[in-house]
Image: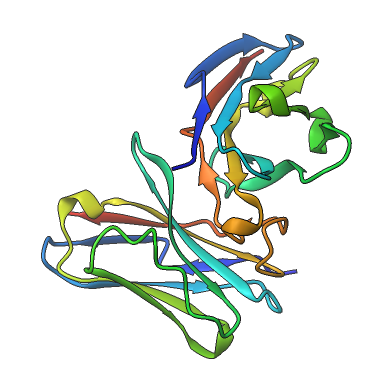
Amino acid sequence: GAGVSQSPSNKVTEKGKDVELRCDPISGHTALYWYRQSLGQGLEFLIYFQGNSAPDKSGLPSDRFSAERTGGSVSTLTIQRTQQEDSAVYLCASSSGGYSNQPQHFGDGTRLSIL
Amino acid sequence: AQSVSQHNHHVILSEAASLELGCNYSYGGTVNLFWYVQYPGQHLQLLLKYFSGDPLVKGIKGFEAEFIKSKFSFNLRKPSVQWSDTAEYFCAVNAGTDSWGKLQFGAGTQVVVTP
């Protein structure tokens, strides 16, 4: 079956521009996660959605970052006024429930480069 | 705050050699433990997981890991590696019911298997 789909796969933009990254989770998965993979930083948690509950935004690095999930499915991560330190691979994952023992399925990521 | 440490950032070994990758975490409560693998050009995939029960867990492709609670460790092993095991390996921890599905990742270990 289809896995987690992310778009675009690559995005190059100028510093100061806004970007939107999209994630389409596996059908039926209620939990959705965003992570960031930076060179030398490993994988960092950004935000988590579970059903209709309020998202866990505890990993967002600044107020320039926001995310929404419409209709319990597709999610969009928005970065406003991008900075060079935002350059990273942004990964989306989904799982069949929000419980801590549900394995997460990852997409291929969006590689974001800020010039 | 919880943290996850992977002791080796880069490992090079020959085919048929044995592999052991160390992972230690700092969290005193109930944890769920994972190893993920990222093959070149592919997305992160679950290798194995530990939630409870037998501390020796077996995963895909001949990998296994042992949870030692007293040492806060979850080391990954494979008795005889193949060239196709060349990949980056990530240990991840979820702090049980306190943090739902949010994963804390180690920095990753790049494993290169030479023919």
Q: Position of residue A74 (x, y in %)?
A: 52, 80
Q: Position of residue A32 (x, y in %)?
A: 56, 69
**Looking at the image, is B13 positioned above or below residue A94?**
above
- Count the marks: how many? 0
Q: Quadrant location of residue B65?
A: top right
* Snapshot colouring: rainbow
Q: Residue furthest right?
A: B54
Quadrant that contains the C terminus of chain B: top right
Q: Residue at x 40, y 67 (%)?
A: A57
**Looking at the image, is B56 positioned above or below residue A64?**
above
Q: Quadrant location of residue B30?
A: top right
Q: Residue at x 58, y 47 (%)?
A: B42
Quadrant that contains the N terminus of chain B: top left
Q: Residue at x 72, y 69 (%)?
A: A96
Q: In the figure, is residue B77 to the left or right of A84? A: right
Q: Quadrant location of residue A25?
A: bottom right
Q: In the figure, is residue A115 to the left or right of B20? A: left
**Looking at the image, is B90 positioned above or below residue B100?**
above
Q: Residue furthest bottom?
A: A71
Closer to the camera in the image, B113 or B47: B47
Decide if residue B38 is in sight here.
no
Decide if residue A44 is in sight here.
yes
Q: Residue furthest left?
A: A16
Closer to the camera in the image, A25 or B40: A25
Q: Residue furthest front?
A: B28
**Looking at the image, is A62 positioned above or below residue B91?**
below
Q: Residue at x 57, y 36 (%)?
A: B90
Q: In the figure, is residue A81 to the left or right of A31? A: left
Q: Position of residue B105 (x, y in %)?
A: 51, 41
Q: Position of residue A30 (x, y in %)?
A: 65, 76
